[in-house]
Amino acid sequence: MKNPRHPSRNPLALLAALLTTAFAPAALIPTEWSHRQTLTVAAPGLVRVDLTAASFDAAGPRQEDLRVIDSTGREVAFLLDRPTASAAHTVRPEAFAMKLGTESSVLTIKTGTHDALASLTLETPSPYFLRAARLEISDDNENWTMLDQGLPLFRQWGAVKLDLSLGGHHAAYVRVTIVDGRGPSVPFTGARLRLDGGQPSAPVPVGTRVASREEFAGETVLSLALDGRHVPLAALELATQEPLFMRRVTVAVREFRDGISSERAIGEGTIYRVALDGSPARAQLELPLDCTPLTRELLVHIHNGDSPPLAIAGVQAKRRPMDLRFMAPAAGNYTLLLDNPQATAPHYDLALFAGEMRDAHAMPVTPGELEPMPGYRPRESLSAASLPEVPLTGAPLDTKNWSHRRPLQITRAGVQELELDVATLAAARSDYADLRVLHGENQIPFVLERPGLARALTLTPVSAPDAKRPGVSVWQLRLPHTGLPLQRLTLTSGTLLFQREFRIYEKLTGTDGRHYVNTLGTGAWSRTPEAGTPETRNFDLPDRPRTDTLLIETDNGDNPPIALGAVRAVYPVVRLVFKVAEPDGFLLAYDNPTASAPHYDLSLVAARLLTAPRNVAQLAAGGATAGDRNPFAGLNGGYLFWGTLALVVVVLLVVVAKLLPKPPTGE
């Protein structure tokens, strides 16, 4: 029985139906679109327009403003085709059993389904392991067919690989044999089956460039520049020749919320290259994505932990296939209109023929170069495309209450990224409300960016034994600045066997002159000689230190003291993003306990500013010098006036006294 929604699949009937719905009756003013691309059609018939990166970049996030017109300016109905595979879903198997052996464990899963199987994901509470697996399928639980062997399964330092591909096979039973020669058996408690949702369309490469690479504490951050915005991303593939690695990777985009720049994760996963039990190396270098970023920028966080950074040769983004189809009644030039923020998605009767248009042969056409629309005139005076330029100057500022001022080193005009150094972080307020960028007496509007990244200082602890407590080990840690906002300390010990309680604290003096202890962090730390036991321990510091000297102590009890190696002090990355028209004469003012956070109109165009190409600005070396400090910072204006007046009066009295004639001396 035919579907009543669709006409006959006869090509002639389809052509006639398409021709009757080819043109949209609504009036259209092409000059309300800011850009256009030429579509050169060689012959009449069904046309498939392969959208380019420039097409996505100029169109709206959902391509809702795309329109096609013929040479007379008449609107042509089209179908925007977004082919997708049928949705895959996950189910629990009918039965799961695990049998432990001397050198291997065998998992037997009764699938309970006749559907094609895409993958199997195992479940385990084990926090740290690396094993090889052999994968087999059967219809009767007796005769088995091996699909693959030497497959890696692991969970290490945040990197996880617990899924095994079943390749769309049908099977009543799945058997996984796990080789346990690397250590004790790993307990697996269950599994999930992902049913095959059909073969997805092959993704399309997107022009991708690594714009920058930065190394942070245990983390590499790649900034990627895509060829266009609004590209419906499907995957991200990293290229590296590293022979053995496992890394957790997070992909994020920048966002601006509540006056602060932040990041939003749009995908995460694990990349690896592993060779186990004599099998060829297995690699997974692609991360699945399902996101349409509003900018050309992606941020890729590669979490290294204590491992060295990976050598990344390149990154390739891939998008979901998408094309635009319409019936051309005649050969000639048609026009694709793009970029109209006031336009909404069209609704054409052509959508009734979506299935037939996907199946029918279509003539491929690639749009021409993106061109500005002559005589462009938006429907409304204010649109996303006509936002004012980023403001370069703010209101004047009296800096008498700011204790520190430091020159900025800017190499060229444009958008600047200034990362605060440890000296500035230590002196500025915890909420950074006292930061100001100045040019002369005027403020320069900026966006505060706190990306969730961190940098680290390597410090050397010095033994500071307490004669009154001989069983307690105490180490002193000197920070480069007082009040540095540390997030955590990572302690290192080469001692192979110990279990201790640690405390991190500082000594303060109260207003009454008495000394007291301010505890910053505590926690247990144990280590055994077994392989894989880490030699480091992280201690979070929820409160900001108030001095430049920290103390680390542990009670040894009846045990010998442990050795404490280098300490890594981790502090946050804080940036200011702003725009300048010239490179000279800029200052950063900070350290004002009474300042309120600034509110700039810049927030209206913050997204544009944050995603623009950036220059790196730097604070002048050496920190705030004595000449940079404001000697009257914090003084009340009235006190300053009367104090100065009193000083002038005293000086005048002294001068007058010296000018008066001396009284005659008696004979």
Image: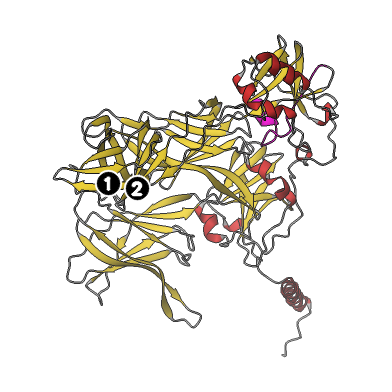
Which residue is disc 1 drawn over?
129
Mark 1 surroundings within 10 Å by alpha-carbon count, few (fewer than 14), some (14 through 19), many (20 or more): some
Question: Which span of residues is magenta-colored?
Answer: 52-71
- Label 2 or label 1, whichever lies nearer to me, is 1
Residue 468 x, y percent position in the rendering: 25, 77
The answer to whether residue 81 is left or right of residue 382 is left
* Residue 546 within the magenta-colored segment of the rendering: no
Relative placement, left or right, of 76 versus 121 is: right
Along the line of sight, which residue is nearer the eye, 544 or 11?
Answer: 11
Provide the residue designation for mark 2: 157
Dot 2: element? loop
- Which structural element holds mark 1? strand
Question: Closer to the N terminus: mark 2 or mark 1?
Answer: 1
Percent position of residue 331, x then y:
75, 10
Does residue 457 appear left or right of residue 372 in this picture? Answer: left
**Quarter containing the C terminus:** bottom right
Seen in the picture, residue 407 relative to 476 is either above or below; the reply is above
